[in-house]
Image (cartoon, rainbow, N blue to C red):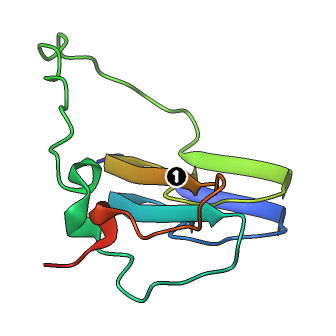
Amino acid sequence: MWKRNSFVQFIDVKSLILTGILEIGDSVQLRANHNILAVQRKQEIEFGNEGNFQAFPIFSEPIPIPPLPEPPPLIRKYNESPNIRVGQIHVEGISTSAIMHIGSTNDVYLESRVLHIRQLPGKEEIEPLSLFTVR
């Protein structure tokens, strides 16, 4: 891996949440993973047996990763200056398996799976969905 020096004069990040990463400098591997199950209801009701990620295939299905292309011909690089210089950065937010990285890295893997469920009542009361029943 390339060895670089990262110099940051000023960085302003307002919010960093939910497996967000701020990395300054070189790294070998960066991994971020986050699962979200969001249920929206018109009435504020909790049935007590909700939140089982195993009940939803979206959270366990493998994500297909395309194969890497054939390696390119050998390229020799010469960086006259091995330094990365950054003046000012202003970021409003880094969230949900996002990475802000100043530097070099070999391997990055980011995964975020989100399932939104909306249960809006009709004329009848809300009843728990069978998907929420833990067996």
Locate the C terminus and report the quarter of the image it occupies. bottom left
Q: Nearer the viewer, residue 89 or 60?
A: 60
Q: Residue at x 19, y 12 (%)?
A: 72
Q: Residue at x 72, y 49 (%)?
A: 85
Whole-percent x and y of residue 2? Answer: 36, 46
Whole-percent x and y of residue 46? Answer: 53, 84
Whole-percent x and y of residue 50? Answer: 38, 78
Q: Nearer the viewer, residue 43 or 1?
A: 43
Q: Residue at x 45, y 52 (%)?
A: 115
- Residue positioned most to the bottom: 48
Residue 48 left/right relative to 116: left
Q: Is residue 78 above or below residue 5?
A: above
Q: Residue at x 29, y 63 (%)?
A: 130
From this viewpoint, is residue 3 visible? no
| Residue type for callout 1 | His
Say which residue label 1 marks: 116
Residue 125 left/right relative to 73: right
Q: Quadrant of residue 18?
A: bottom right
> Label 1: few (<14), some or many (≥20) within 10 Å?
few
Element type at mark 1: strand
Whole-percent x and y of residue 103? Answer: 53, 52
Q: How many marks?
A: 1
Q: Quadrant of residue 65?
A: top left
